[in-house]
Image (tube, grey):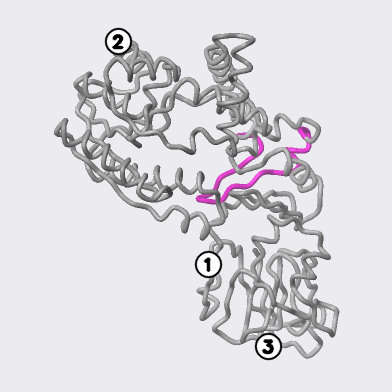
Amino acid sequence: MLGKFLKYIEDNRLARKDDRILIAVSGGIDSMVMADLFIRSGYNTGIIHCNFTLRGNESDMDEELVRTLATENNLPFFTKKFNTAAYAEKNGISIQMAARKLRYEWFEEIRINNGYDYVAVAHNLNDSAETLLINLTRGTGIAGLAGIKPSFKKIIRPLLFATRNSIEEYCSLNNISYREDKSNSETKYARNKIRHRVLPVLKEINPAAEFAISETAERLSLTYKVVNEYIDEIRKKTASVKGNKIFFYANRLKQFIKNDGVLFELFRPYGINSSTLKSLKKIISGDTGKQVFTQTHWLVKDREKILVSEISNQENISYEINNLKELRAIPFIKSVVRKKYSSDYKIPADNLTACIDFEKISFPIIIRKWRSGDFFYPLGMNRKKKLSDYLIDRKLSRQDKEHILVLECNEKIVWIIGERIDNRYRITPETKQVLLIRV
């Protein structure tokens, strides 16, 4: 096992002998075996442990076992307790996703602050096979079928060569202590269903199923490199980046409108999946103002361009704006113009532009996420309407609704951003100055 471990590190160029390695140890069998292999190999290492406080005293006992490992081997030890459940609830994500985000952000912080070259995590061959099967079940592109990579940025996975059975054998032969997370045996999670119910059946067909799946993933990974080069060439011809702004030329994308594979790979970095691909096609061939939200990005049609903006965490988003200069500084505001109104002025018809009677607003104004109970007077109507009812009428998806923002003045909605202005702030024959805001 030790020889295979060192060979895998060398073959995949995961680390050099003089590199400093931070070993992520949970206390489970995989990470305890990986720590033992690193210690026997003579690498300059430290131990890092996350206590996610999800299992009460059990979590504390995991931490104590890992602390003992570090102390007995005279290794630097880093540990931190996280209120994972609260973080997941606040950010509207699963416990597993919260733990992953907290873990890797903290790993990188400790790595940089303490001069380590890499962080080693203990994914094994079975984990890679399970990941491929999970992604295949949920629907994915080639990238999702490429399994777990041996390295990504400063994360290395030197145990990917080993099956779970070989890890258990090594653990037994070397009397390595570890702690078993009882949730690993439960089948309410997708990964555990694959692990305990699906893979055993596949191994009845092929006893070396995990190896076969892993080899397939490796071949697909090589195929993906070829595909990625092709997609990169298309991206160079269809997209442009200016500073932190990304946009695609819709007319250049139209030749791929029937090629779902190309569009999927082009926009996959921006969160497009099979359920949002149809909406993307409508944006490409549609009018200005067509938009779609993914989990990570906002895509919107602006004349012949499709603008791509990263979505920040909008849970508590709120901007208090005291003047036009501050309004222009808001990340998603494209332009702010104040001009005199004349009878021949042509009001823009697209939803991305708000045309407001400037004298009807006063600073400060607020941009915030919409709330239950909000109401406004839709343009062209003299009676109020609940914003929630308006969004239902618009047939927006739940995801789209989550990203709706409003511009507010004196606790009155002026504009549902990217949708519709309030009738009370419309341009009239009495208007003297126009405020034109474009997102």
Q: Which mark is residue 3?
A: 2
Name the quarter where the N terminus is drawn.
Answer: top left
Mark 2 or mark 1: which comes first in sequence?
2
Distance (Cα) linking label 2 and label 1: 52 Å
Q: Quadrant of residue 222?
A: top right
Task: Give x and y (percent) for residue 237.
Answer: 64, 34
Task: Give x and y (percent) for residue 245.
Answer: 56, 51
Secondary structure under the numbered disc 2 in the rendered image = helix
Distance (Cα) linking label 1 and label 3: 27 Å
Near-viewer residue (9 or 33): 33
Secondary structure under the numbered disc 1 in the rendered image = loop
Residue 4 falls within the magenta-colored stretch: no
Dot 2 and dot 1 residues touching (CB under 8 Å): no
Q: Residue furthest bottom?
A: 430
- As shown in the figure, which amino acid type bears the numbered disc 1? Asn
Name the quarter where the C terminus is drawn.
Answer: bottom right
Question: What residue did someone put label 1 on?
Answer: 316
Question: What residue did someone put label 3 on?
Answer: 360
Mark 1 or mark 3: which comes first in sequence?
1
Q: Residue at x 67, y 30 (%)?
A: 137
Task: Give x and y (percent) for residue 85.
Answer: 47, 54
Question: Is 287 situated above or below 358?
Answer: above
Q: Is residue 11 left or right of residue 47?
A: right
Q: Which residues are magenta?
A: 236-256
